[in-house]
Image (cartoon, rainbow, N blue to C red):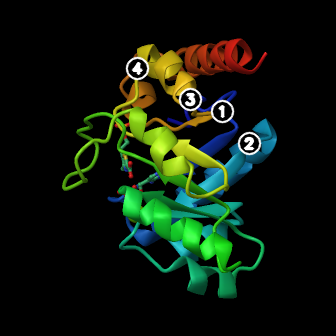
Amino acid sequence: MARQRAGRGAKIVQLRDKDSSDRRLLEKARYFRRRTTEAGALFLVNDRLDIALMSGADGLHVGQNDLPPEEIRRLAPDLVIGQSCNTEEQARRLGQQEQRSELVLSYYNIGPIYPTGTKDGLAEFIGPEAIEAYSRHCSLPFTVMGGIKEHHVEDLVRAGARRIAVVTAVTDAEDMAAETARLISRITTALEERDG
Ligand SMILES: Cc1ncc(COP(=O)(O)OP(=O)(O)O)c(N)n1
Ligand SMILES: Cc1nc(C(=O)O)sc1CCOP(=O)(O)O
Ligand SMILES: [Mg+2]
């Protein structure tokens, strides 16, 4: 993906790799760190705090069954930390932590919005209507993810999204860089139409 400069123009690039050996993952993370720094993009690692710290990543994304954000924050006070939110109850809990000034996250993700084959065992897809319902609980920035393709962009932005995260929309594209550019352009236009 980095070879084709797939993330060119993306503001955030996440390294999500469940298969590489630890040593290879670290090499990849250091490569992504160099390339995202050159591109002025934020670099996040999925799941692995050790790899995030050793590669100098800006942040870490964790799911509900991954490392606990509070303990990550204790070890890494300056790291961007994001967490997946797959049910409204989870979003409500983030809101309650926020009210108590106990929220350590930098952002959260709402999803899966549409059906996706990228991850086995994910919760049922929740549809774009869930964006408004979930995001009203917590004022942090959020991304939306799950089965999102280019033609979904306008619906998602109308439903309240600003930051759209994709895997296969880009990785399955013949020209990943061109697809990234198309997505960014469509998101920018939809946001301009919505927000003026
Ligand atoms: C931006 C973003 N949102 C959600 C996820 C999914 O995280 P998780 O639920 O831990 O699943 P895996 O990606 O680890 O399979 C994500 N990676 N990024
Ligand atoms: C791994 C993952 N987590 C999600 C969540 O909503 O928590 S959606 C997702 C898969 C995203 O891949 P694609 O863009 O190919 O559907
Ligand atoms: Mg995870």
Residue 105: % across, % down = 63, 68
- Residue carrying label 2: 41
Q: Nearer the viewer, residue 105 or 30?
A: 105
Few, some or many C-alpha atoms within 10 Å of disc 4 (few <14, some 14-19, many ≥20)?
Answer: few
Mark found first going from the N terminus, 1 or 2? 1
- Point out the quarter of the image occupied by ligand 1: bottom left
Q: Nearer the viewer, residue 180 or 1?
A: 180
Residue 6: % across, % down = 56, 29
Few, some or many C-alpha atoms within 10 Å of disc 1 (few <14, some 14-19, many ≥20)?
Answer: some
Do residues under tags 2 and 3 come within 8 Å of each other at their CB atoms?
A: no
- Residue carrying label 3: 6
Do residues under tags 1 and 2 come within 8 Å of each other at their CB atoms?
A: yes
Q: Nearer the viewer, mark 1 or mark 4?
A: 1
> Label 1 to label 3, Cα distance in Å?
9 Å
Kind of residue indicated by mark 2:
Ala
Q: Quick check: 93 left or right of 194?
A: left
- Residue carrying label 4: 173
> Label 4 to label 3, Cα distance in Å?
10 Å
Q: Can residue 145 be seen in this snapshot?
A: no
Mark found first going from the N terminus, 4 or 3? 3
Q: Nearer the viewer, mark 2 or mark 3?
A: 2
Identity of the residue drawn at 27% across and 37% down: 116
Q: Can residue 59 be seen in this snapshot?
A: yes
> Label 1 to label 4, Cα distance in Å?
15 Å
Residue 159 versus residue 125 in the image, above or below: above
